[in-house]
């Protein structure tokens, strides 16, 4: 969650009283590895079906942070296509809403006050900030999974080729940026994943080399706690409670 702390540091110009490392954030769940028909399903086929099973569903999830015991809880609203994550970082409760190009960060300026940013304005040096706005990005990267094998019942591993990610929008920008930072390793980044009792994707863990705002490795550790349940509506805050983000936010450290 090293990006999250960087988020607090970068938005300090908006009136934040805390500085520290990052938060990991939203968008929908996309189809993973394409499956091929077979009388005996291969691990890649089973894994593709597991990822596809949560496609287009309302999703609740958690993302573990780099610090022990630190995590963010979140939800994806299939109706609005928006994601909201909430967590406590160094004593500051932060809420982040991602709605397409719009990002709203609550808690930095006080209760019920929000900072608004636009995803398209972030420069390459600050692109990792978008992990807050699209916290399901790592799941979307599974569209480029290869070498998938079933290590044991419900547990899979393989590699992801960031240069072949088919996601669009913020997830694609993250994949391209992370690929540049990873260098030659970008074509085969190891991942591990598990399925739940209904054979749907449950957890995903991938480490992206030098991908956080400070140039350190970024660990993506997602756990889907519910898929297909009732919606948790995600909407933009009232305009009179929103302040525009400062230009420095988009430049990065």
Image (spheres, helix red, strand yellow):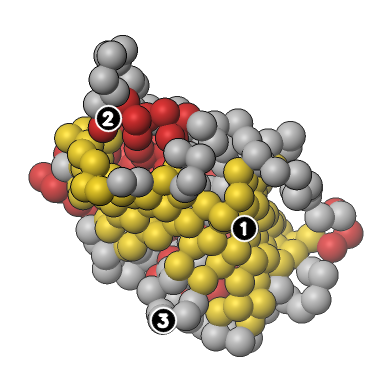
Q: Is residue 244 left or right of residue 70?
A: right
Distance from disc 3 to disc 2, alpha carbons, whole Å, reads 32 Å
Which picture quadrant has residue 216?
bottom left
CB atoms of marks 3 and 2 within 8 Å? no
The residue at which mark 1 appears reads as 74
Image height check: is 214 above or below 133? below
Image height check: is 182 above or below 39? below
Which picture quadrant has residue 166?
top left
The residue at which mark 3 appears reads as 68
Q: Is residue 63 left or right of residue 190?
A: right
Quadrant (top left/top right/bottom left/bottom right) for the C terminus: bottom left
Residue mark closest to the camera, 1 vs 2: 2
Residue plotted at (54% across, 74% down): 8
Distance from disc 1 to disc 3, alpha carbons, whole Å, reads 18 Å
Local crowd size for mark 1, using a 10 Å CA cut-off: few (<14), some (14–19), many (≥20): many
- Among the two numbered marks 3 and 2 on one chain, the one whose residue lies closer to the N terminus: 2
Quadrant (top left/top right/bottom left/bottom right) for the N terminus: bottom left
Question: Which of these two is toward me, 107 or 116?
Answer: 107
Task: Report whether residue 143 is seen.
Answer: no
Secondary structure, mark 3, is: loop
Residue plotted at (28% across, 58% down): 207
Residue plotted at (47% across, 30% down): 52
- Among the two numbered marks 1 and 3 on one chain, the one whose residue lies closer to the N terminus: 3
The residue at which mark 2 appears reads as 44
Residue 37 on image: x %, y %: 31, 12
Residue 18 on image: x %, y %: 58, 85
Local crowd size for mark 3, using a 10 Å CA cut-off: few (<14), some (14–19), many (≥20): few
Residue 34 on image: x %, y %: 34, 21
Question: Which of these two is toward me, 140 or 169?
Answer: 140
């Amino acid at each position: 969650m090293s990006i999250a702390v960087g988020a607090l540091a970068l938005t300090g110009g908006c009136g934040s009283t805390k500085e520290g490392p990052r938060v990991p954030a939203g968008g929908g769940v996309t189809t993973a590895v394409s499956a091929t028909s077979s009388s005996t399903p291969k691990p890649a086929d089973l894994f593709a079906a597991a990822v596809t099973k949560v496609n287009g569903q309302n999703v609740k999830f958690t993302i573990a942070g780099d610090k022990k015991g630190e995590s963010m809880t979140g939800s994806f609203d299939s109706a609005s296509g928006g994601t909201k994550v909430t967590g406590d970082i160094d004593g500051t409760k932060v809420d982040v809403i991602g709605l397409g190009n719009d990002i709203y960060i609550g808690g930095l300026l006080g209760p019920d006050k929000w900072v608004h940013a636009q995803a398209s304005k972030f420069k390459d040096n600050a692109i990792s900030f978008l992990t807050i706005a699209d916290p399901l990005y790592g799941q979307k990267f599974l569209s480029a999974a290869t070498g998938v094998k079933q290590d044991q019942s419900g547990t899979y591993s393989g590699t992801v080729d960031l240069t072949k990610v088919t996601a669009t929008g913020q997830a694609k920008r993250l994949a391209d940026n992370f690929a540049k930072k990873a260098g030659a390793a970008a074509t085969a980044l190891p991942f591990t994943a598990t399925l739940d009792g209904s054979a749907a994707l449950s957890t995903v863990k991938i480490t992206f080399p030098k991908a956080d705002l400070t140039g350190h490795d970024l660990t993506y550790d997602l756990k889907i706690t519910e898929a297909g349940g009732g919606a948790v509506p995600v909407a933009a805050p009232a305009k009179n409670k929103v302040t525009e983000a400062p230009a420095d936010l988009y430049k990065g450290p």
